Amino acid sequence: MAVTILIPTALRLFTDNLSEIKVENSVTVAQALEALVTEYGDLRRHLFTDEGTLRSFVNVYIGEDDIRELNGIDTALKDDETLILVPSIAGGV
């Protein structure tokens, strides 16, 4: 079972400039993200806290569905599904 993870421009520095990465044997979002940060270790600190939880400003979507509205990182994945990482961007005047 393979899942594709789309990497936003801001994080490509940590993935050898790849915009998408396929990970194998991932049944849940948690497993897919763990496979990603195992392959690209410098990315871990940008996605996860020191306690291992997904950072609050990192949004993960399966299609148009925010995983927070599903089962969070325990959301089940289907073969050939695509995860989209979207870091929140703060700003103001």
Image (spheres, grey):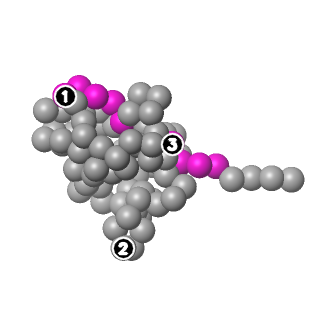
Element carrying mark 2: loop
Task: Give the residues drawn in magenta, as a range.
Answer: 79-89
- Is 24 contained in the magenta span? no
Marks 1 and 2, how far apart at CA: 29 Å
Q: Are marks 1 and 2 in contact (CB under 8 Å)?
A: no
Q: On the rendered image, what quadrant is the N terminus found in?
A: top left
Label 3: how many Cα within 10 Å (few below 14, some 14–19, many 20+)? some
Residue located at (41% from left, 59% from top):
54
Residue 8 horizontal/vertical position (percent): 48, 40
| Amino acid at dot 1 | Asp
Q: How many marks?
A: 3
Q: Amino acid type of disc 2?
A: Glu
Residue 30 position in % (x across, y down): 27, 51
Viewer-closest of 42 and 81:
81
Residue at 39% across, 42% down? 70
Q: Is residue 88 visible to the viewer in this orientation of the structure? A: yes
The spot of residue 20 in percent (x, y) is 35, 34
**In the orientation shown, which residue stands out farthest toward the right?**
93
Residue drawn at x 64%, y 49% as measured from the top left = 89
Three-letter amino acid code at disc 3? Answer: Val
Q: What secondary structure is marked by label 1? A: loop
Disc 1 versus disc 3: nearer the observer = 1
Q: Residue at x 47, y 29 (%)?
A: 64
List the residue tagged with mark 2.
51
SS at mark 3 in the image: strand
Q: Identify which residue, 39 or 72, lies in the foreground.
A: 72
Query: Who comes first in sequence, dot 1 or dot 2?
Result: 2
Please state if 47 lies on the left or on the right of 33 as rendered: right
Q: Which mark is residue 79?
A: 1
Task: Tell me the residue that label 3 is attached to.
Answer: 86
